[in-house]
Image (cartoon, grey):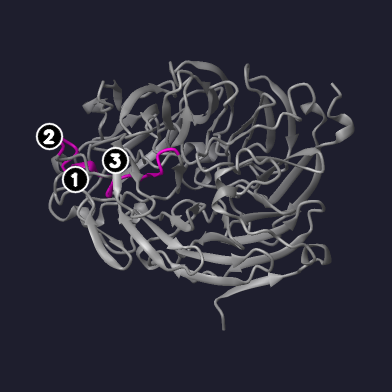
C-alpha cells in the first residue's frame, strides 16, 4: 500500500479551469504581479512587500472576513505556513505535513494531501510546516520525515518524492522549498541531533538530485552524481573529528538574489552546544575555534552548489544563536545593493550583495550580554565571562558555571520573517526581549539522540512585554517605532505600498499597523495564536489578505518560564481570508 495518500475532492469549477504552468519568469516577477502569490516571501528576495495600495491607511478599517477554512481533525499544533495563490486556487500547508488546495472565491476544499508519517520522527520544535513552492504544473513541499514531495497542482496526486536525509538520525524538513531555474532547492532540519547541514538541488520535473552542498568544513559536495569539491578546509576551524557531526542545519530555507545570481542560505548552530568541546570556549590564535560554516550566511552558485562567499555572524558560538535567519535583498537610499538580516544573536547586519562582505551592524534588542558590540570586520566583541562555563573545569566535572545570557537561545529573532518596505526603506522586524540561564554539560554523540551538552531556562526580561515589533532604519540602526506585545511574537510580517504593516500575535489578534508610526489601524481576533505568515493579492478588482491562525511552534515546547506565561493560549487551525469590498475601498 502506498505510504502516502491524497484525498481528492475536485469541484466542478476547479476541474473545468485550465491552469497555466508557472515559469521562471513568473517567479522572478512574483512581487510585481499582484494577482498571484507564487513564492515564499512574496518574491524570492523575501521582502514580503506588496505594491498594492487599494487597501491603505484610510480604508483598512473596512477590511472584512471573506471566508475561513478549517484544517480540521485532531492534527493541530502550530500553523506557521505562508499560503500561495495561483489561478484561483490557494495552496497552504498544515502541521503534520499536510497540504490543501482551496477555491479562493469560496473557501471550499478542492483536494487535500496527507503525508503518512512513520513512527519515530524527531522534529525539534513542533510538527509545523512553513509552506510550499510552485513551478510548472507542480507544487513542492517537505515532510517531517525529511522528504521532498512533488504533487500535481490540479489533483494533488504524487508526481515524485525523494528522501532528503534519514529521519532516524534526527533529520527532518519544515521549510518552504525554493525554485530557481527549474531546480527545487531545499535545506534540512535537525541541528540538535548532531546532523550536518546541507543544501540540495533537484530537477523539478524528475526529482533527480543535481547537486548537494554540505555546509560544515570537511564534507564533500556532489554535482551530477559525482563528488565535486570539499566544503572549506578540513580541520581549519574544527578540532579532530567533530566536523563529522558539526550541526549547521539549514532549517529555514533560503532566498535568491537574481541580480547576482546567488542563493543565500543561513546555517544553524554548531553541534554540540557545549562550545568548549569545539575549541571555541577559549579564544585561540587565528580562527581555529570558529567552527565554519555554522552560524553563518552562505552565498551559493545555484547551478553548481559551489560556495561563493560566507559571513559568520557568531563565530565560536555557544548560546544556540543559529545563523539561519532570512537574508533579504534590497537597494538602499544611495542605490547600493545590500542584504539585510536580523540574527538570532540580537544584531541586525547589513552586507554587500556582491560578495557578502560586512557593511554594518546594530543591535535590534535592548539587552545583549554575550557581546559588547560588533567590530569593523563584522566579528563580535565577546564578553567572555558571559560564556557558559567548561564542565571539565568544574569541581564535580558534570556541570559548568551557569551564566545569564541575553538574548535567550530562542533568539532576539527566531524563524519568524521580517518585511522590507520599498516605500519607507524600513525593515519591520518581529523580535523578542528575553534572556536565559545556561550551563554546559558533558556530552558524547549518539546517532538519533539529542546532542546538546547544555541546559537552559529561558526567562522574560520585562514585566510589560516580551514581543517587540520594531521598524528599523538599516542605514543607521535607528528604531523608528516599536510595538510591544505581552506574549512572544512568533509570526511573520508583511508590508504594503498602502502604508500598512500586517502581523499577528499569540493572543490571536491579526493586526494592521501604520508603517510610519506603528499605530494599530485595524485588528481582528482569529480565535487562536497567529504564528503564520500573511499575504495579500487582488482578484476581481478587490484586495485580499490571508493568514494562518493556530498557536504552537517552539515557544510552548522550549519556552521555560515564558511557556508557563502563555500556557492559557488555545490551539487552532484556521486559514482566515479577508477582503476590502469595492464599495468600501474609497470610504474612510
Cα separation, mark 3 vs mark 2, equals 19 Å
Front-most of residues 367 and 180? 180
Magenta stretch: helix, strand or loop mostly: loop
Can residue 394 be seen in this snapshot?
yes
Of mark 2 and mark 1, the one earlier in the sequence is 1
Nearest to N terminus: mark 3 or mark 2: 2
- Residue sitting at 22 percent across and 50 percent down? 217
Image quadrant in which you'd find residue 72 = bottom right
Quadrant housing the C terminus: top right
What is the spatial separation of the Cα atoms under label 1 and label 3, in whole angstroms? 23 Å
Residue annotated with mark 3: 309
Of discs 3 and 2, which sits in the foreground? 3
The residues colored magenta run 259-287
Q: Nearer the viewer, residue 350 or 514?
A: 350
Query: Where 265 falls versus 142 (above or below)?
Result: above
The residue carrying pointer 3 sits among few (fewer than 14), some (14 to 19) or many (20 or more) residues within 10 Å by Cα, namely some
Q: Position of residue 117 (x, y in %)?
A: 52, 69
**In the rendered image, the vertical position of residue 334 relative to residue 450, given as above or below:** above
Give the label, 2 or 1, closer to the camera. Answer: 2
The dot on residue 297 is none
Can residue 494 be found in the magenta stretch?
Answer: no
Q: Earlier in the sequence, mark 1 or mark 3?
A: 1
Residue that label 1 marks = 278
Mark 2 falls on what kind of element?
Answer: loop
- Residue at the left extreme of this rendering: 285
Query: Is the N terminus in the top left, top right, bottom left or bottom right quadrant?
Result: bottom right
- Residue 216 coordinates in the image, percent (x, y): 26, 51
Residue denoted by label 2: 286
Instruction: Name the secondary structure under disc 3.
Output: strand
Q: Residue at x 43, y 39 (%)?
A: 325
Residue contact between numbered discs 1 and 3, judged by CB atoms under 8 Å? no
Amino acid at each position: 500500500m502506498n505510504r502516502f495518500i491524497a484525498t481528492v475532492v475536485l469541484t466542478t469549477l476547479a476541474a473545468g479551469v485550465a491552469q497555466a504552468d508557472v515559469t521562471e519568469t513568473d517567479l522572478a516577477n512574483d512581487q510585481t504581479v499582484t494577482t498571484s502569490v507564487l513564492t515564499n516571501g512574496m518574491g524570492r528576495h523575501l521582502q514580503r512587500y506588496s505594491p498594492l495600495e487599494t487597501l491603505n491607511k484610510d480604508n483598512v478599517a473596512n477590511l472584512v472576513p471573506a471566508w475561513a477554512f478549517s484544517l480540521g481533525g485532531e492534527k493541530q499544533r502550530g500553523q506557521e505556513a505562508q499560503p500561495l495563490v495561483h489561478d484561483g486556487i490557494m495552496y497552504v500547508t498544515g502541521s503534520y505535513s499536510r497540504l490543501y488546495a482551496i477555491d479562493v472565491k469560496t473557501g471550499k476544499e478542492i483536494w487535500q494531501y496527507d503525508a503518512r508519517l512513520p513512527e519515530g520522527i524527531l522534529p525539534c520544535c513542533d510538527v509545523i510546516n512553513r509552506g510550499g513552492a510552485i513551478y510548472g504544473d507542480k507544487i513542492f513541499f517537505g515532510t517531517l520525515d525529511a522528504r521532498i514531495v512533488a504533487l500535481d497542482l490540479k489533483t494533488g496526486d504524487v508526481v515524485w518524492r525523494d528522501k532528503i536525509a534519514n529521519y532516524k538520525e534526527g533529520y527532518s524538513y519544515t521549510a518552504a522549498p525554493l525554485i530557481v531555474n527549474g531546480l527545487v532547492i531545499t535545506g534540512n532540519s535537525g541541528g540538535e541531533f548532531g546532523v550536518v547541514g546541507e543544501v540540495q538541488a533537484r530537477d523539478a520535473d524528475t526529482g533527480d538530485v543535481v547537486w548537494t552542498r554540505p555546509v560544515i568544513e570537511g564534507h564533500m559536495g556532489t554535482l551530477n552524481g559525482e563528488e565535486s569539491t570539499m566544503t572549506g578546509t578540513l580541520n581549519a576551524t574544527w578540532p579532530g573529528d567533530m566536523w563529522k557531526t558539526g550541526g549547521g542545519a539549514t532549517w529555514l530555507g533560503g532566498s535568491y538574489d537574481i541580480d547576482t545570481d546567488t542563493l543565500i542560505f543561513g546555517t544553524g548552530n554548531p553541534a554540540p552546544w557545549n562550545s568548549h568541546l569545539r575549541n571555541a570556549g577559549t579564544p585561540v590564535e587565528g580562527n581555529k575555534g570558529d567552527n565554519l560554516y555554522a552560524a553563518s550566511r552562505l552565498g551559493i552558485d545555484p547551478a553548481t552548489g559551489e560556495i561563493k562567499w560566507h559571513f559568520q555572524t557568531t563565530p565560536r558560538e555557544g548560546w544556540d544563536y543559529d545563523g539561519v535567519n532570512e537574508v533579504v535583498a534590497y537597494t538602499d537610499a544611495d542605490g547600493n545593493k545590500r542584504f539585510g538580516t536580523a540574527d538570532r544573536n540580537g544584531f541586525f547586519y547589513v552586507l554587500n550583495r556582491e560578495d557578502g562582505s560586512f557593511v554594518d551592524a546594530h543591535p535590534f534588542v535592548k539587552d545583549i550580554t554575550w557581546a559588547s558590540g560588533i567590530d569593523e570586520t563584522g566579528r563580535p566583541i565577546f564578553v567572555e565571562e558571559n560564556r557558559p562555563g567548561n564542565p571539565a573545569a568544574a569541581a564535580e566535572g558534570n556541570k559548568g558555571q551557569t551564566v545569564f545570557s541575553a538574548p535567550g537561545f530562542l533568539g532576539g529573532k527566531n524563524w519568524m520573517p521580517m518585511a522590507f518596505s520599498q516605500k519607507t526603506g524600513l525593515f519591520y522586524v518581529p523580535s523578542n526581549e528575553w534572556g536565559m540561564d545556561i550551563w554546559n554539560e558533558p556530552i558524547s554523540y549518539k546517532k538519533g539522540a539529542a546532542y546538546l551538552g547544555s541546559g537552559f531556562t529561558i526567562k522574560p526580561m520585562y514585566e510589560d512585554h516580551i514581543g517587540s515589533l520594531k521598524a528599523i532604519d538599516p542605514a543607521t540602526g535607528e528604531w523608528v517605532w516599536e510595538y510591544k506585545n505581552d506574549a512572544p511574537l512568533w509570526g511573520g510580517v508583511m508590508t504594503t505600498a498602502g502604508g500598512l504593516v500586517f502581523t499577528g500575535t499569540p493572543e490571536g489578534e491579526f493586526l494592521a499597523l501604520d508603517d510610519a508610526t506603528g499605530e494599530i489601524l485595524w485588528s481582528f481576533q482569529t480565535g487562536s495564536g497567529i504564528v503564520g505568515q500573511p499575504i495579500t493579492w487582488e482578484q476581481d478588482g478587490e484586495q485580499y489578505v490571508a493568514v494562518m491562525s493556530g498557536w504552537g511552534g517552539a515557544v510552548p515546547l522550549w519556552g521555560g518560564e515564558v511557556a508557563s506565561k502563555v500556557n492559557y493560549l488555545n490551539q487552532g487551525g484556521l486559514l482566515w481570508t479577508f477582503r476590502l469590498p469595492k464599495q468600501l475601498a474609497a470610504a474612510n
